[in-house]
Amino acid sequence: MPRLALVAASIVLAAAPGAASAQSVRVSPTLDTELTWTDNVNAERNGRDDMILEVSPGISVSRTGGRLTGGLTASFRNLMYAQETDQNTSFLSLNGSGTYEAIEDMLFIDAAAGISRSNLSAFSGRGPGDPLGVSEDNETRTWSISPRVESDLRFGEAGRGSVRYSSRGFSSKEGGLGDQSVSQWDVSLSDPGGFRFLGWGVAYSRTDTDGDTSTSRSSTEEVIRGTLFANISPQFRMRGIVGYETNDYSSGNETNSDIVGGGIDWYPTDRTAISATVEDRFFGRGYDVSFNHRMSRSVWFLSASRDTSSIGRDLGLVAVFDPRCLDFLQGAGRPLDSLSEDERELLLDECINSSLLQTNAVYVNRSVRGGFSLLGVRNTLNFAVTRSDRSNLSELSGLVPGDPFLTSDRVRTTSATVSWNHRLTGTSALVASLTRSRAEALEDEDLDTRRLSGTIGLTRTLGPYTQGSLRYRYEKAEGTTDYTENSVTATLGMRF
């Protein structure tokens, strides 16, 4: 099968010595163990307690030199329950990504693969990223491969062209989503400073989405845009946009629409970046706005967007819902201990706040995300809030049971997270987080789940290759899912 072949290829690419020196390749066998006591093992209204032991041997591979860079973590997770022995399970957990520079400064090949188990439903069962949500029905496999050609062209001030083909997909047992794949072509040619004050650019994209169930039929979207740049100053640039798009999202009928819009790119300081784009699209007003500002001891960010999407696009990176996604998001094989404290916490926010929607429909997603990190000598405080408001764009009939668009054309998910890291000594730290979230179907009162989860724990480095932790977790869900859970987990992780 192509997905399994890609997984194997990713492992080979990450570990192959290639032309770089041996010092750039790092291979580390791992052994992670966890012992968890929970008073609600099945996440039910009147649950029972249980003890769960997890033993997970694995391997971590990273490469940071030469034409091949990337990282991969794989572990064979084995969970054994003291009482609910019928829930005993073993499965492969894998996250990997890499880039190969086939032709220097021109042809690159990006690849990624992942296998994970986590509940995709925003309304029922355990919350996204819950470490005990490892039912076989929750297993999801993702893969992607993307060759791209990028080149600095010899015309104008900064002529540049690129061609990218992306093939990605996923398979999931949960809710009968089945296998889905997305193929996308992106071609662009631009010279933002071609005439010094004025610049230009043109871009074309085609996205084909395929599914193997009656509720995830094939669809195609094509978009072409032309952009005129006005370089007001080195720090400020304006953009005018015209284009044309076509798709068959609505019951297979072709929809055609003009695109008219504009935007700005503003860099008032070296630490501040502001970008905004607004367009008239076939679904109404589309936009993409972002603000990022870094100070000596703080990071601030805000973003808002409205565009079409689907689970096939959103699920391109398994890391966003895997409870161990930090190992993957560190990127390009960078070991976790090489990241600064603020980078770790920002990645953790990405893991906690990312939300998916279990549906085969194409939808318009209006999302907002903002937050900040305050960085001290021994303390790091992070706050992040996200909201996604999705409107059904497809007119599919016979959606699978559990699909929120079956009874409502609008679904909204909101979450707010605050996390704190206090370094006690050079080898130990106290960590805590609190998350409040809500998922609601605006046209179906029966689909409304509110969650409150909090964790507090102590982590300690026990040796050069050994780390342990003790963590308490509380979770409460009300509405469509109704339960309360307390759990205590002790972990011991070793790297060889």
Image (cartoon, grey):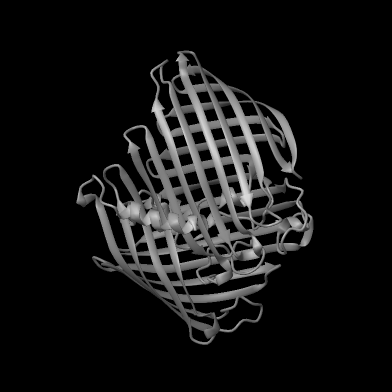
322 relative to 40 in the view: left or right: left
Q: Tally the marks.
A: 0
81 relative to 12 in the view: left or right: right
Q: Residue at x 74, y 58 (%)?
A: 399
Residue located farthest toward the bottom when viewing the structure as drawn: 83
Front one among 79 and 184: 184
Is 368 rendered above or below residue 357? above
Residue 453 in which image quadrant: bottom right
One can see residue 101 in this view: yes
Front one among 458 and 438: 438
Q: Residue at x 40, y 58 (%)?
A: 8
Tell me the quadrant of the picture where the C terminus can be found.
bottom left
Is 155 rendered above or below residue 295? above
Q: Residue at x 64, y 77 (%)?
A: 44
Residue 69: x %, y % from top left: 33, 47
One can see residue 380 in this view: no
Front one among 224 and 40: 224
Residue 159 in which image quadrant: top left
Residue 430 in which image quadrant: bottom left
Residue 202: x %, y % from top left: 54, 24
Residue 145: x %, y % from top left: 46, 47
76 relative to 247 in the view: left or right: left
Is 113 rendered above or below residue 48? above
Residue 481: x %, y % from top left: 67, 69
Is 177 rendered above or below residue 188? below
